[in-house]
Image (cartoon, rainbow, N blue to C red):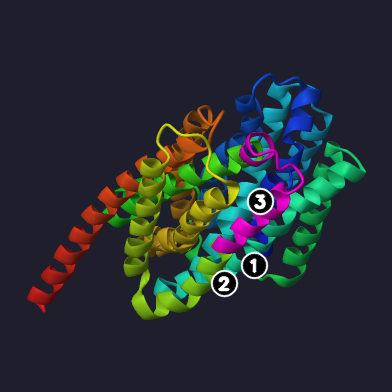
Amino acid sequence: MMASLMSVVALAIDALLPALDTIGIDIGTTTVADNQLLITMIFLGLGTGPMLFGPLSDSLGRKPMVYLGFGIFFIASIICVLSDNLIVMVLGRILQGVGLSAPRTLAIAIIRDKFSGDYMARIMSFVTVVFLLVPIIAPATGKWILDAYDWQSIFYVQMFIGLLVTWWFWKCQSETLKPEDRRPMTRQKFTNGFKEVVQHKSTMGYTLVSGLIVGSFLVYLSSSQHIFETQYDLKEAFPYIFAGLAIAIGTAIFSNATLVMRFGMRRIVNAASVLFFVSSLVYVLLFFGKANPPVWVLVSFFAVQFFSIGFLFGNLRALAMEPIGHIAGIGAAITGLISTLMAVPISTFIGRYVIDTAYPLFLGFLICSTLSLGVIVYLNRVYQRSVSAMSSSA
């Protein structure tokens, strides 16, 4: 059920990919970068929305906020269907993100209400595996709908599935926030919660790393249609290539569910970060100043990188949330906001350079992975010092 709440987000993003050029023609966009905004701007809403739903969920409960979020999503989807220019479409996409941020964020808060530590990371891995089934089939589904009907029908299908998920959630999911754990929403509560979140070095550090990783991945997400359909002229094959790369991420996440219980989150994050950095560096060195390599080479590099990213997504969120479980709602909101406010500008900036080749994308991967490794090295030293201090006192 938690996976289904999050899957509507993936559907709203990935099903639209094959239709970007068609929508762009209808709403009068002039550049590839404008079309990419239809993907990146939904993440702006996904990042800012939790600041509303997170604190409210700590006060009123998780379930009412999920219902409110889906209501906003339905209204925003109608705006997208009726839009005839880029500004209205972008507004609709941002509002879609705001609405969907409720089920996306509160699914994490609900899991944190019930689990913690490495076991929480294990549950997050299982949830994300199911969640990733949607990116595997969404582009192909979107293309089928586009070919059979029109791009507006993609939004109608999203709304229908959102309605089914809302009904299932209402019917089967109990409230996980106990009445005695609820806190009235006040400015002081939010301020105190924010101060508590930012004072934890591990929470802030892993949130920054999450922002860098998500930002680099968003560049691929927003530019993949242009790379494979325009640069490689693989319009018909694009949905299947996208699905194959989603499987690479899913394989890593599925493996993580078992490995995290054996090695722990930190070791896995360390190893995956190094793999992400090395694969980015190798591509940048091999293809500097050159045209795109054969498509199988490009897909192979993507697969290695996304395999490493698959080990990072859930573990980074779990590590960031670990010290702040008692304020899971506002904690998930603040960490989500910070990572998204980092990711959207990163992806928008790098995406504008992905015009003739995929090289700028890998250069962006390299920069983000280098910064991430620096933060992780620092956090590992802080963790070792704290463990040594605890051992000495014992």
- Up/down of 156 relative to 131, above or below: above
Reply yes or no: does residue 240 show up in magenta. yes
In the image, what residue occupies the spot 72% across and 25% down?
88
Work out which quarter of the rendered image holds the N terminus and state it: bottom right
Mark 3: amino acid? Val
Is 46 placed left or right of 71 in the picture?
A: left
Amino acid at circle 1: Val
Element carrying mark 3? helix
The three-letter amino acid code for the residue at tag 2 is: Phe
Disc 2 target residue: 126
The quadrant holding residue 52 is top right
Q: Nearer the viewer, residue 379 or 48?
A: 379
Badge 2 crowding class, 10 Å Cα cut-off, few under 14, some 14 to 19, many 20 or more, is: many
Instruction: Tell me how far mark 2 sits from mark 1, CA to CA.
Output: 7 Å
Q: Is residue 38 magenta?
A: no
Q: Which residues are magenta?
A: 227-248
Along the viewing direction, whichever of 345 and 290 lies nearer the viewer: 290
Figure quadrant of the C terminus: bottom left
Residue sitting at 45 percent across and 76 percent down? Answer: 119
* Image spot of residue 5 (x, y percent): 67, 59
Q: Residue at x 81, y 36 (%)?
A: 78
Any mark on residue 130, and which?
Answer: 1
322 shown above or below 200: below
Along the polypeptide, which appears first: circle 3 or circle 2?
A: 3
Find out whether the residues at labels 2 and 1 contact each other: C-beta distance under 8 Å: yes
In primary-sequence order, the first of circles 1 and 3 is: 3
**Residue occupied by mark 3:** 9
Question: Whole-percent x and y of residue 192?
Answer: 36, 48
- Residue 312 falls in which quadrant of the image? bottom left
Secondary structure state at the residue bearing disc 2: helix
